[in-house]
Image (cartoon, rainbow, N blue to C red):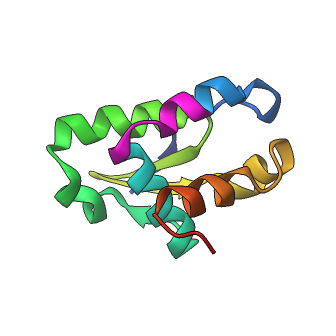
Amino acid sequence: MTSQQFESPSLTDISLTQLLKSLSDPTRLKIVQTLLRVGTEISCAQFETLGKKSNLSQHYRNLRQAGLISIRREGRHSYLTLRKTDLDRRFPGLIEVIVKNSDGRDD
């Protein structure tokens, strides 16, 4: 079975404006929160409770185009990974701050 990696923007092409706009959607924010918490690649099937498959596909595409995630397809299954290392290189600590301040905690 072959694996296909979908193209993500290069580090220098990741825009803060596009990144923040992408994370303004609650579903996309939940996807990123989960990916950050788990810290490894996750099957798209793990997010089926967040909505319809067709809507989730659009959310994944948006997150990938904003530079937040990478997507690997293997057979009929897709796997998401948060581009944390790249994002920390471009915007140090930003993802953690956004996630921390979006989950209702003040610690």
Residue 7 appearing in the image: no
Residue 60 x %, y % = 40, 40
Report the residue at 63% width, 75% height from top.
Answer: 107
Say whether residue 18 is visible. yes
Q: What residue range appears in magenta?
A: 20-27
Q: Residue 23 location in percent, x, y?
A: 50, 40
Q: Residue at 28% x, 59% y: name it.
A: 47
* Predominant secondary structure, magenta span: helix
* Residue 80: image location, x then y, percent: 46, 55
Q: Which residue is drawn at 33% across and 46% down?
A: 27
Let me know if residue 22 is in the magenta part. yes
Q: Nearer the viewer, residue 105 or 83?
A: 105
Residue 93 picture quarter: bottom right
Q: Where is residue 99 in the image (x, y as percent from the top left)?
A: 56, 58
Quadrant of the frame with the N terminus: bottom left
* Side of 33 relative to 19 (left or right): left
**Left or right of 5 on screen, residue 2:** left
**For the view shown, which residue lies furthest in the front direction?**
106
Determine the residue located farthest toward the left in the rendered image.
52
Q: Along the line of sight, which residue is nearer the eye, 34 or 74? A: 34
Q: Please tell me whether residue 23 is drawn above or below residue 85 in the rendered image.
A: above
| Residue 87 belongs to the span the image colors magenta | no
Look at the picture and state if 64 lies above or below 85. above
Q: Which of 74 and 16 is in front in this view?
A: 16
Q: Residue at x 50, y 56 (%)?
A: 102
